[in-house]
């Protein structure tokens, strides 16, 4: 049975003090749909009630969710942009979720950065991050990555496969001229 969740409050993104922070777009909502689709799977990983907080990244407008066990400390999330980190904290607060934004490049602590990819095939940041995924992902963890066709999702799946992770496209859609996919990885 599929559970439906309300769209998080994010009306402050791209407004007021957050004018430099992109508001969620098709990629953001596709990721939320993928996490909603995987809710039961995510819940089974911990055997406990899970919470998810939607964070809005300032560089690209990508949205990612931090999944954590309900009685654990606030999960960290990272961004290189201080305004985006503050917007993430505001978004979490508006949705009664506790998150701990950390301003850093790529990965800080055990958090994950959502950033504009750029570069060749739009993977400049992604290619720097991929080698770290296998080190950061717990034995029961799941890693979700939003890609476009130009990112060569099949190659990303092969690269992480060489690091002992199994990956697949769990949800895809077309947004204008882009083909968006959410890739899901777990330990083999």
Image (cartoon, grey):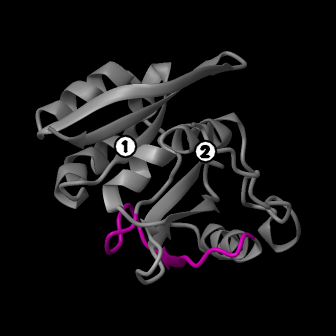
Taking the spot 84% from the left edge, 66% from the top edge, the residue there is 12
**Residue 125 seen anywhere in this rendered image of the structure:** no
Quadrant in the rendering for residue 87: bottom right
Write the residue at 53% across / 56% down. 65
Label 2 with label 1: CB-CB less than 8 Å = no
Vertically, is 19 above or below 169? below
Q: Is residue 81 left or right of residue 108?
A: right
Density class for disc 1 (Cα within 10 Å; few <14, some 14-19, many ≥20) is many
Disc on the earlier residue, 2 or 1:
2
Where does label 1 land, which residue?
126
Magenta segment, prevailing SS (helix, strand or loop): loop
Disc nearest the viewer among 2 and 1: 2
In the rendered image, residue 107 lying in the magenta stretch gets the answer yes
Magenta stretch: give its range.
95-111
Q: Is residue 72 or residue 61 the one in the foreground?
A: 72
Quadrant the C terminus occupies = top left
Q: Secondary structure at mark 1?
A: helix
Give the numbered dot on residue 32.
2
Question: Residue shown at 24%/54% (left/top)?
Answer: 140
- Name the quarter where the N terminus is drawn: top right
Q: Camera-side residue: 2 or 83?
A: 2
> Residue 37, how many percent across, how many down?
54, 37
Horizontal placement of 111 versus 162: left or right? Answer: right
């Amino acid at each position: 049975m599929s559970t439906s969740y309300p769209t998080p409050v994010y009306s402050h993104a791209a407004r007021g003090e957050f004018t430099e922070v992109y508001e969620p777009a098709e990629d953001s909502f596709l990721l939320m749909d993928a996490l909603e689709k995987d809710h039961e799977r995510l819940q089974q990983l911990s055997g406990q009630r899970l919470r998810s907080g939607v964070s809005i990244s300032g560089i690209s407008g990508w949205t990612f969710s931090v999944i954590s066990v309900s009685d654990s400390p606030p999960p960290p999330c990272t961004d290189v942009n201080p305004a985006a980190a503050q917007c993430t904290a505001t978004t979490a607060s508006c949705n009664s979720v506790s998150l701990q934004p950390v301003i850093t490049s790529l990965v800080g602590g055990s958090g994950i950065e959502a950033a504009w990819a750029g570069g060749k095939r739009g993977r400049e940041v992604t290619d720097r991050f991929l080698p770290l995924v296998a080190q950061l992902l717990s034995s029961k963890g799941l890693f979700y990555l939003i890609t476009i066709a130009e990112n060569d999702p099949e190659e990303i799946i092969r690269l992480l496969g060489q690091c002992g992770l199994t990956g697949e496209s769990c949800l895809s859609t077309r947004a204008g001229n882009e083909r968006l996919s959410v890739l899901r990885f777990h330990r083999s």
